[in-house]
Image: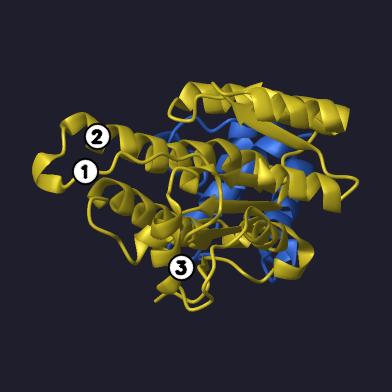
Amino acid sequence: MGIARYFLSRDPEACVWLGVRANRGNAENLAMEYGIRCQLIDLEVTSPTAWTLAVEKIVETSGSLDVLVNNAGMHRDCLLAAMPDDAWHSVIAANLDSVFHGCRAVVTPMMRQRFGRIINIASLSAVLPPLGQTNYAAAKAGVVALSQTLAKEVARSGITVNSLLPGYIDTEALGDMDVEARKSIQRGIPMRRFGTPEEVASAVYFLAGVDAAYVTGAAIKIDGGIF
Amino acid sequence: MQGAELRQKIKEVMVEELMLEQDPSEISDTVSIFGGGGLGLDSVDALQLVVGLEKHFGLKVGNSEAAKGILETVETIAREIEKSA
């Protein structure tokens, strides 16, 4: 939601479509705030059919689709030795299959208009995986590799494809963490703080803009210096 | 659009869509579009060409097997467009 808000507040001509399924509350509030410039569209990101229908509707309504930000994802952390099949498959589906389906759905319309910006939100786990995230880390590393490969395939068509690798970002996902745990993690971050959602959004905004026209296939860490 | 006019337009679309650094008039009707010995374009170009042909001529190339035959030369593309008109 932070990314959508950033685009809407920075660019008065931006029209944002938010793919939603459950938990529509925040999205509905944003749509009410920005009216016609922010619209919701039903999207089960693991469904190729849902992607096709959503992209058709957006192109038909807006006339073009310039930017895709793949930001859906979920964790089901578990040591591999004890990981149920479902924990593996559901995490791969939500984090990697979704990106594949989304990219495939937008590539042809973007090729037709000879312009497009695809920004896939991966994770620092793609390159520095913690224990218990074989599923999530594999999916996010897959997102980086998919982005780099697709970047080569569509470069001549005026489409850029990049991935962002956020580290610890102060979102709801960290909300349950107690104070001591937060401090402990922050001590391991060279900048000694978590990132903000706006700092991720600003990187997305940069990659979507004209200033990033020659940036493609990049995997940009946003992590306060962890490596 | 048919005949020489159509073939000329296909060449213009190829140059525009594939950003070829040559004049459309330098492309013959029968030169191989892909692979060595012809224009030397690759599978990435083929994808953009398919999108361009649909955009400019409404030609839908169904699958990769069909594409191989249709996208062989300017002449084969023109025949397919004339057939589907």
Amino acid found under the numbered disc labelled 1: Cys
Q: Which mark is residue A78?
A: 1
* Chain letter matching colour yellow: A
Q: Mark 3 Cα within 10 Å, few/some/many (few <14, many 20+)?
A: some
Front residue of this view, candidates A80 and A144: A80
Q: Which residue is mark 3?
A: A186
Let me know if marks 1 and 3 both belong to one chain. Answer: yes
The spot of residue A193 in percent (x, y) is 54, 68
The hue used for chain B is blue
Q: Mark 2 Cα within 10 Å, few/some/many (few <14, many 20+)?
A: some
| Residue A5 appears left or right of A154 | right
Front residue of this view, candidates A175 and A65: A175
Does the rendering let one see residue B84? Answer: no
Q: Residue at x 89, y 45 (%)?
A: A13
Do the CB atoms of the residues marked 2 and 1 lie less than 8 Å apart?
A: yes
Secondary structure, mark 3, is: helix
Q: Which residue is mark 2?
A: A87
- CA gap between label 2 and label 1 equals 8 Å
Q: Earlier in the sequence, mark 1 or mark 3?
A: 1
Q: Is residue A167 above or below residue B67?
A: below
| Residue A197 appears left or right of A5 | left
Give the farthest residue toward the right. A12
Secondary structure, mark 1, is: loop
Q: Residue at x 62, y 42 (%)?
A: B51
